[in-house]
Amino acid sequence: MPIYYKILVFILTSIGFIWVSRASLGNWRTHGFYRFFAWETLLVLILLHLNHWFHEPWSIHQMVSWLLLFASTGLVLHGAWLLKVVGKPDSTRDDPSLIGIEKTTKLVKAGVYRYIRHPIYSSLIGLGWGVCFKQPSLVGVSLALITTALLTIAARIEEIENRRFFGSDYECYMKKTKMFIPYLF
């Protein structure tokens, strides 16, 4: 893909990210602030690696990449579905920095949420590393590390927000689960 198309895609996609994140961008104390920059970093990573998506399809780095990409797809779909069905998002949850399915009124502890608290962030981290492995490079690894750091900060802030909304129930839940990877982290 020519560079000018990539720049156009970056600008148009960034406008969408800005629109979705508009309530959070003015407040660095919300998880959405850091999530926005993680999305932007992921977008840059994807656009940089776009030409290598199917290059050397049977190489080890491509197989690792596809494994991470498929796992991240499953995580985001399952996590989002559970937030919608079990979490019962409702517009009465008064926090302008939350978007759509984040406005849960019930604490979700089913499915993948039994093991990790942030499957959607886990999927974004997996996406970042999956894209990085398309064509491993210092720039790609740096962007994947930045994405991971931004999503970790977003998750920690979101946990503060969730403790504020769900109270001691969320604190007990935190003790029984890991942040991103079951049984590890």
Image (tube, grey):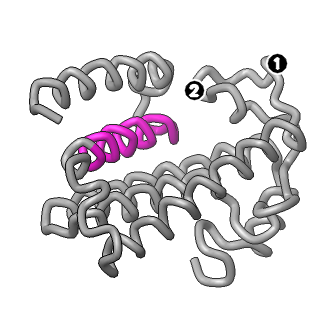
Q: In the drawing, does residue 24 fall left or right of residue 38? A: right
Q: Judging from the image, what secondary structure is the residue with disc 1 in?
A: loop
Q: Quadrant of residue 149?
A: bottom left
Image coordinates of residue 81 in percent, x first then y, are 78, 43
Residue ID at (79%, 75%): 176
Mark 2 → mark 1, Cα distance in angstroms: 13 Å
Left or right for 183, reference 139: right
> In screen coordinates, is 88 left or right of 43?
right
Neighbours of disc 1 within 10 Å: few (<14), some (14-19), many (20+): few
Main secondary structure type of the part rendered in magenta:
helix
Instruction: Give the quadrant of the C terminus.
Output: bottom right
Q: What mark, if any, has residue 97 been given in the picture?
A: 2
In the rendered structure, does residue 169 fall within the stretch colored magenta?
Answer: no
Which residue is located at x 81 percent, y 46 percent? 82
The residue where tag 1 is placed is 92
Q: Secondary structure at mark 2?
A: loop
Is 151 situated left or right of 8 in this image? right
Up/down of 99 relative to 42, above or below: above
Stretch in magenta:
29-46
Which amino acid type is shown beneath numbered disc 1? Thr
User: Disc 2 marks which amino acid?
Assistant: Ser
Residue 183 image-quadrant placement: bottom right
Residue 30 shown in magenta: yes
Q: Quadrant of the N terminus?
A: top left
